[in-house]
Image (spheres, rainbow, N blue to C red):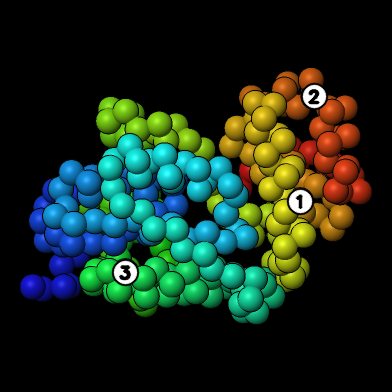
C-alpha cells in the first residue's frame, strides 16, 4: 500500500484505503461526523477519548452518547496532562507539546489493539498557518480524512444534520487551557474555575462563548446576539462568577 496518498474523492474511498483505523475522538462536530462515516465504511474502527484536566465533563458525556449512537467501541484514556511541564508552563507552542502527549497515549493504546493508523477530525477549513498542534499531528503521521477529502466545516455540519447527528449545530469548542493567557502557568484550580463559570453560563442559555482569565478577572466573550441575555442575568452572573474571580469584565469584541 502506498501510504503517501494525499487526496481522496470521498470518505468511502478513504476508508476503503484505510479499512482498519483508530479515531482520536473528542465528541465535537468534526470527530463525531468522522466516527459516523467510519462506522459505515471502515472494516474495523475504534474511538479513543482522552480524558484530561483540559476537557470539560460535557465533552465526555457527548462522546459516550455518540459512540453508543454509532454502535462503535470507545476507550477512555486518562492522562495527567498537568504532569507535563512543557504544557503547564504555557509557552506559545503549548499546543505542540499537548498534542504530542495526547496522541502518544492514543497511539500506544491503538497499537495494543492492533491499529496502525490514527485519524483525527481536522477538516478542510482548518488553516495550517502557524499552528503548533497541527505540526505535531504531521510529525506523528496522524491522518485527517475530512481534510484529505476536501470536506469543510460547513459541509460537516450539513452532512451531520442530514444524518441526524445531534452535534451538527454544536458550537466550536477549544480546550480549557486556551482560556489561560500564554505565559501564565496552567494549574488545576484555574481550569476548575473556568469550567465552573462556563457551565453556569451555558445553563442560562449562552452559546458559543468563552470565559478567559485576565489576571484575577473573568473576561467574558459572547456573541452579539447574546448581549441581551447577559444584560438580563447581569446581577446573577456577577454573583456566581465572583465566587471564584475578583471581578467580571465584558469583552465587546467577538470571541476568538
Relative to 219, say whether 105 is above or below.
below
Q: Which mark is residue 193?
A: 1
Residue 9 is left or right of residue 83, and the answer is left
**103, 51: nearer the viewer:** 51
**231, 204: nearer the viewer:** 204
Residue 71 is left or right of residue 42, and the answer is right
Residue 119 point in image, percent of width and height: 30, 61
Disc 3 crowd rating (10 Å Cα; few below 14, some 14-19, many 20+) is: many
Residue 211 can be seen in this image: no
* Mark 1 residue element: helix
Q: Quadrant of residue 239?
A: top right
Where does label 2 land, which residue?
233
* Mark 3 residue element: helix
Q: Quadrant of residue 6?
A: bottom left
Q: CA distance from mark 2 to mark 1?
A: 19 Å
Q: CA distance from mark 3 to mark 1?
A: 33 Å
Residue at the spot 50% in from the left edge and 43% down from the top edge = 61
Q: Earlier in the sequence, mark 3 or mark 1?
A: 3
Q: Residue furthest left?
A: 1
Q: Earlier in the sequence, mark 2 or mark 1?
A: 1
Residue at the spot 35% in from the left edge and 44% down from the top edge = 67
Query: Which callout, 3 or 2, points to the residue nearer the camera?
Result: 3
Q: Quadrant of residue 134?
A: bottom left
**105, 120: nearer the viewer:** 105
Relative to 42, say whether 4 is above or below.
below
Residue 226 point in image, percent of width and height: 67, 26
Residue 220 can be seen in this image: yes
Residue 232 is left or right of residue 67, and the answer is right
Q: Earlier in the sequence, mark 3 or mark 2?
A: 3
Where does label 3 land, which residue?
110
Amino acid at each position: 500500500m502506498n501510504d503517501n496518498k494525499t487526496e481522496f474523492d470521498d470518505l468511502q474511498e478513504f476508508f476503503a484505503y484505510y479499512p482498519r483505523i483508530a479515531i482520536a475522538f473528542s465528541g465535537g462536530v468534526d470527530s463525531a461526523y468522522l466516527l459516523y462515516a467510519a462506522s459505515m465504511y471502515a472494516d474495523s474502527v475504534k474511538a479513543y477519548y482522552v480524558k484530561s484536566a483540559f476537557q470539560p465533563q460535557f465533552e465526555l458525556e457527548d462522546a459516550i452518547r455518540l459512540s453508543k449512537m454509532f454502535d462503535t467501541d470507545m476507550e477512555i484514556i486518562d492522562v495527567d496532562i498537568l504532569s507535563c511541564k512543557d504544557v503547564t508552563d504555557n509557552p506559545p507552542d503549548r499546543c505542540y507539546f499537548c498534542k504530542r502527549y495526547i496522541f502518544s497515549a492514543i497511539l500506544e493504546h491503538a497499537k495494543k489493539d492492533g491499529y496502525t493508523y490514527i485519524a483525527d477530525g481536522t477538516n478542510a477549513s482548518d488553516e495550517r498557518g502557524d499552528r503548533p498542534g497541527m505540526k505535531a499531528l504531521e510529525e506523528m503521521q496522524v491522518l485527517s480524512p475530512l481534510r484529505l477529502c476536501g470536506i469543510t466545516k460547513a459541509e460537516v455540519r450539513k452532512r451531520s444534520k442530514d444524518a441526524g447527528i445531534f452535534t451538527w449545530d454544536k458550537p466550536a469548542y477549544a480546550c480549557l487551557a486556551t482560556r489561560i493567557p500564554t505565559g501564565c502557568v496552567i494549574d488545576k484550580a484555574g481550569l476548575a474555575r473556568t469550567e465552573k463559570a462556563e457551565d453556569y453560563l451555558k445553563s442560562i442559555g449562552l452559546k458559543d462563548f468563552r470565559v478567559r482569565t485576565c489576571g484575577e478577572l473573568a473576561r467574558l466573550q459572547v456573541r452579539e446576539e447574546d448581549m441581551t441575555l447577559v444584560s438580563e442575568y447581569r446581577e446573577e452572573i456577577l454573583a456566581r462568577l465572583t465566587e471564584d474571580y475578583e471581578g467580571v469584565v465584558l469583552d465587546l469584541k467577538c470571541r476568538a
